[in-house]
Image (cartoon, rainbow, N blue to C red):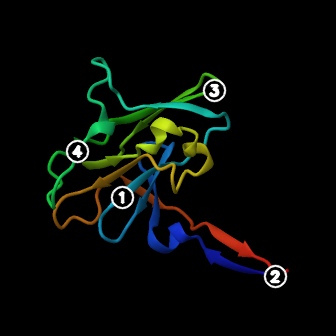
Amino acid sequence: MTSYASVVDRIYKRHASEKYSNISYLHHPSGVTVVVLREIPESEVISVEYGATKKHGVDRSNVAVVGKGKKGGVVLQTDTKLCTIKCADGSEITVRSGVKGTLVEMNDRLKTQPDLIRTAPENQGYIAVVTYGAGIRETDGFGEVLPQKRLKLQKL
């Protein structure tokens, strides 16, 4: 039996969050980081809220980023709330950024297909894309490097 690194692991390096155990980061060598859920909920995800009310702040899903300098991106602190995930069993998961950077994109697919967080967490179900500014490839907030996921192929 032969094992190969997954497509995600061939391109990105996995990091845990230093502050929050429910998220991890897929860090690309170019400096772009994808925020994904590390602890996948067992119950179906019924909605993802990006903070569109006055009490919860600006709707992060409508951020319009333009140009090379990422103008219009939301500046993130380590405790900035990205979204709240609501599950069918009544549980809620609050996702915070865990790193300082610029929010470039929130996953729009999660508005219409929120269960992608559970069914495809590292592909279509990612939460956000974060960058760090000109020339900065990594930031504080990355924890330990997580092991790669291996795909095992068996000849028939």
Q: Pick whichever of labels 1 and 2 is earlier in the sequence.
A: 1
Q: Quadrant of the C terminus?
A: bottom right
Residue closest to the far front: 112
Is there CB contact under 8 Å for labels 2 and 3?
no
Can you say whether 117 is above or below 14 in the image? above
Q: Pick whichever of labels 2 and 3 is earlier in the sequence.
A: 3
Closer to us: 15 or 50: 50
Type of the residue with mark 4: Ala
Q: Which dot marks residue 88? A: 3
Q: Nearer the viewer, mark 1 or mark 2?
A: 2
Type of the residue with mark 3: Ala
Query: Real-space Cα distance between discs 1 and 4?
Result: 18 Å
For label 3, the SS is loop
Judge the density around disc 3: few (<14), some (14-19), many (≥20) Cα neighbours within 10 Å. few
The residue under the point 26% across, 29% down is: 58
Q: In this view, does 100 lie to the left or right of 90?
A: left
Q: Pick whichever of labels 4 and 2 is earlier in the sequence.
A: 4
